[in-house]
Every structure is written in structure tokens, then in C-alpha cells.
Amino acid sequence: MRFTRLGKIFENVLIVIFIIVIGVLIKSFYDNYTNLKTLQQTKEQLNKEISKEKKDVQHLKENVNSTNSTIEQKARSQYYMQKDNETVIIFKK
């Protein structure tokens, strides 16, 4: 009689432990899924920001190129250069 009671208690304890382990596994999978979803949303947001920054950088490059060519044109109209090997001498017109 004692052994059957102990066996039944042991069986119930094992069932409770099994249910707890299953619950922990389900919670772990759910947390991982939630984290993955959050990471994907963050990645999409960062990709949007990166593409916006790339457009801004491209626009700035175009502005710099246009400014450089304007400065170069002004300099050519006011100065001329004479190259002697490695030396560059600039004379005012």
C-alpha cells in the first residue's frame, strides 16, 4: 500500500514537472519569436533611414561638385597656372 501511494505521488510530481517544462519551452519559443519580429521591424526602419541618408549624401555630393566647378571656373578666369615638374605656380591675370 505504501509503494502504490509513493508511486502515485511520484507519478503526479513527474506530470507537474513535465507540464512546467512544456510551459517554459512554449514561453521561450514565444519570446524568441517576439524578439525576432522586433529585430525585423528595427532592421526595416534602419534600412529606410540608411536609404534616406544615402539620398542626402548623394545630394550633398552633387552640391559640392557643382560648387567646386563654379570655384574652378572663377579661378580660371582670374588666375592661370604654370607647372614646372612638381611645382605649381599661380599667377594673377
Image (cartoon, rainbow, N blue to C red):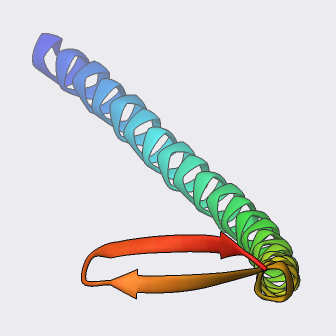
- Image x and y of residue 17, in percent: 35, 30
User: In the rendered image, is residue 80 in sight?
Assistant: yes
Position of 40 compared to 93: left or right? left
- Image x and y of residue 14, in percent: 28, 32
Residue visible at 46% across and 38% down? 24
Q: How many numbered discs, if any?
A: 0
38 relative to 3, above or below: below
Residue 54 position by quadrant: bottom right
Closer to the camera in the image, 52 or 56: 56
- Image x and y of residue 33, in percent: 59, 60
- Quadrant of image for the C terminus: bottom right
3 relative to 48, above or below: above
Position of 4 compared to 39: left or right? left
Residue visible at 80% across and 66% down? 49
Position of 58 compared to 43: left or right? right
User: In the rendered image, is residue 51 in sight?
Assistant: no
Residue visible at 40% across and 85% down? 83
Work out which residue is located at the far left of the displayed protein and give it. Answer: 3
Closer to the camera in the image, 50 or 25: 50
Residue 56 position by quadrant: bottom right
